[in-house]
Amino acid sequence: MSDTPQGKPIEPHMMLPDLLREYPQVRPVFDRYGLRGCGGVHGPAESIEYFARAHGVELDRLLDELRTAAGSREVSLPVAGQERSAMDALADGIYRRFFKGGLAIVLTAGATWGALLLTRIAMAHDFTAISIHDINAHGHAQIFGWVGMFVMGFAYQAFPRMKHTHLWRPDLANLTFYLMLAGIIARVIGEPLYQWPLLRSLAVAGALAEIVAIGLFIFIILNTFWQSGKPIEVHEWYILASLGFFVIQAVYELGLLVATTAVNTLHELLPLVATYQSPLRDLQIHGFAMMIILGVGLRMFPALFGFHSPSTQAKGLAFALLFVSILGEAAFFILYRVSGERGWIGPLYLCVLVLAASSIALTGRWGLLARPTERDRSIKFIRAAIVWLHLSMVMLVAAPLYIHLYLPAVGSSTEGGQLALQIGFSHAYYGAVRHAITVGFISLTILGMAGKVVPTLMGVDVRRLRPLWLPFALVNTGCAMRVFFQIATDRFDWAYPLSGASGLLEVTGIAIWGVHIVRIMHGWQPAGAPASEPMTRITADDKIGLIVARYPRTLPMLIDRGFKPLSNPIARRTVAMAISVRQAAAQHGVDLDELLDALNRCAFGQPEPIRETSSSQ
C-alpha cells in the first residue's frame, strides 16, 4: 500500500532525528504542527510521543499522518535542506537575539548593578542609603530587560507553534528588539542622571520607545493567534492578561518617571514613591511576570515534565481570582494612600489573601509535591521556583503580623528596624518579599525553561548536557541569603554584610548559566554528539559510537556480531566515539568488508552491498 512505510516502522517512541533520516518526506507533517526549523536538519532529540505532547497534537492522528507521508515516498513539499525564505529564517531564530539581549542586560544593569547597590546598602547599614532613581533604573532593567526580553523572545518562538501557525510579520518582531534594547539603554543611563535635562529627555524617549515596542509585540502576537483560526484556550487567558499588564505597567512607569524626575525636593518625592511605587511593582511582578509564567506553565509543564494539569474549571476560576486580585491590590493601595481612609485596608488585604490562595492552589502540585514523569535537568529549577513563589505569597500575607506584632515584640537594635517600628513599614521585609518572587520564582523559571528550550531548538540532546547544579545552587543560595538576612537587618547589624554578599552568588550563578546557553546558541555541541550533516554511507573510518548514536538500529546488530561492550551506554558515549569501524573490526577479528556491508544495509536499508576493502584505505 502507498500509505504504508517500507522501512523501519513508525512508532511513538521513535526519535525525530531517526525518523527524519529514514523518511525525510515526513518533515512537512511536523512543520505543520510547529517544528518549523527547530533542531536543525533532523529536528530535536525527542520522540514522536513527546513532540505530540509538547505541541498539543493527538498522537494517533500524528502517527497516521506520518505513516501516510512516509508511505508515499514522494518529497513534494518543502523539507529540511531546501531553501527557506528570509522571513522564515528570521522567525525561527529571532528568539536568540532576545535571549542574548536579556542576558547582557541582567549581567550589567540588572543583577550585577543590583549586587553593587546591595553592597552599598550593606556598607551603610541603611536600605534608604541609595538613590530611588538608581533603584528604579536597576528595577527597570530587570523587568524590561531580563524578564521582558525573555518573554518576548519565547513568545515569538513558542506561541506560533502552540497554535500550529507561523509568526505574523517577523520583520516587525525584529524591529521590536531594537526598539526595546534602545529604550532600556536610554532609561538605564538617563534616569539616574535625570538632573541633566538632556538625559532626562533621553530617559523619557527610551520609555516611549519601549511602549511602542510592547504595543507592536502585542499586536504581532494577537495577529499570530488570529491567523491560526484556533479558539482561545483557558491557559491563553493568562497570557493575554499578562500582555495587557505588560503595556499598562509600561505606560504607568512612564508617568511615574516623569513625576519623580520633575520634583525638586525629597519632601515632594517621598509621597509619590510611597503612593505609586508599590502598585507599579505589583502590576509588573504579579500582573505581567507571574501571569505569563502561569499561562505558559499550564500549557507546557505537563507536556514537558509530566507535571499535574489542573482541570479546566480550576484554571478558569484561578484566572478570575488572580486577575481581580491583582487589579484590586494595585487600585485599593492607591485609594488608601490618596484618601488616607483606613477603610481601604480591608479590601486591599482581602485581595492579597485571594492572590496568595489562588496562586498557591493552582501551582501546588508543581513544586515539592510534583511527581514528574520525565527526567530532565530543568525540573529542579521549576520546582524550586514554585517553592519560592509560595514562600513569597506566605510572606506577603504575613507582612502585617511581622510589622505590627512580631517586630514590636522583639524590638530592634538597628536604625532600619527602629524606623520600621515608627512608620509601620519595613523596607527590609517588603524588599525580601519582592526578591523571593523576582529571583526565586521568575528568574529560576527563566533559567529552567531556557535551559530546556534552547538546546531543543538548536538540535542538542539535553540528555548529553551538564545538569547545571552549580548555577542552580548559587542562585538559590544567594536568594535564600538575601531574603532571610535582609529581614534580619531589622534586628541585627551583622546581617547587613551577609545580605550584601548574596548578590555576588546570584550573579555568578546566572553568568555560568548564561555562558552555557550562549555557547549552545552559537552552535556548540557536547562531546560525542551526532554530527548535524547526514551520512550518505558508512565508511571504514567512521566512528562506531557516532554510527550507533545516529542510527540506533545498528546497535543490536553490532552486539549480535560480538561487539558486547556497546551494550554499556557509557562505553558508547566515550570509548566508542574514538574507535573507527576499521579498528573495531580488527580488534574483534571481524571481516571489515562484511561489517561495512551489514552496517550500511542496517542503517540505510540498501538492497545492494557497498564494498570497501581495507586495501583501498
Image: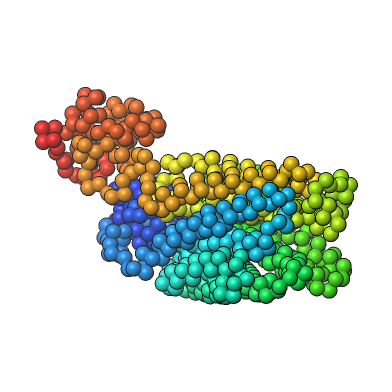
Q: Is residue 137 left or right of residue 167?
A: right
In-front residue for pair 260/366: 260
Taking the image as drawn, is residue 285 in sight?
Answer: no
Q: Residue furthest left?
A: 615
Q: Position of residue 224 (x, y in %)?
A: 48, 71
Q: Is residue 122 left or right of residue 474?
A: right
Q: Is residue 516 left or right of residue 343?
A: left
The C terminus, quarter of image: top left
Q: Quadrant of residue 615?
A: top left
Q: Position of residue 132 (x, y in %)?
A: 68, 63
Q: Position of residue 215 (x, y in %)?
A: 54, 74
Q: How is the image coloured?
A: rainbow
Name the residue rendered at 37%, 45% in the picture: 525
In-front residue for pair 237/101: 101
Q: Residue furthest front?
A: 196
The N terminus, quarter of image: bottom left
Name the residue rendered at 57%, 57% in the picture: 110
Q: Quadrant of residue 175?
A: bottom left
Taking the image as drawn, is residue 520 in sight?
Answer: yes
The mark total stands at: 0
Q: Position of residue 87 (x, y in %)?
A: 37, 69
Image vertical order of residue 356 relative to residue 380, above or below: below
In-front residue for pair 516/256: 256
Image vertical order of residue 545 relative to residue 454, above or below: above
Name the residue rendered at 49%, 71% in the picture: 179
Name the residue rendered at 73%, 57% in the picture: 128
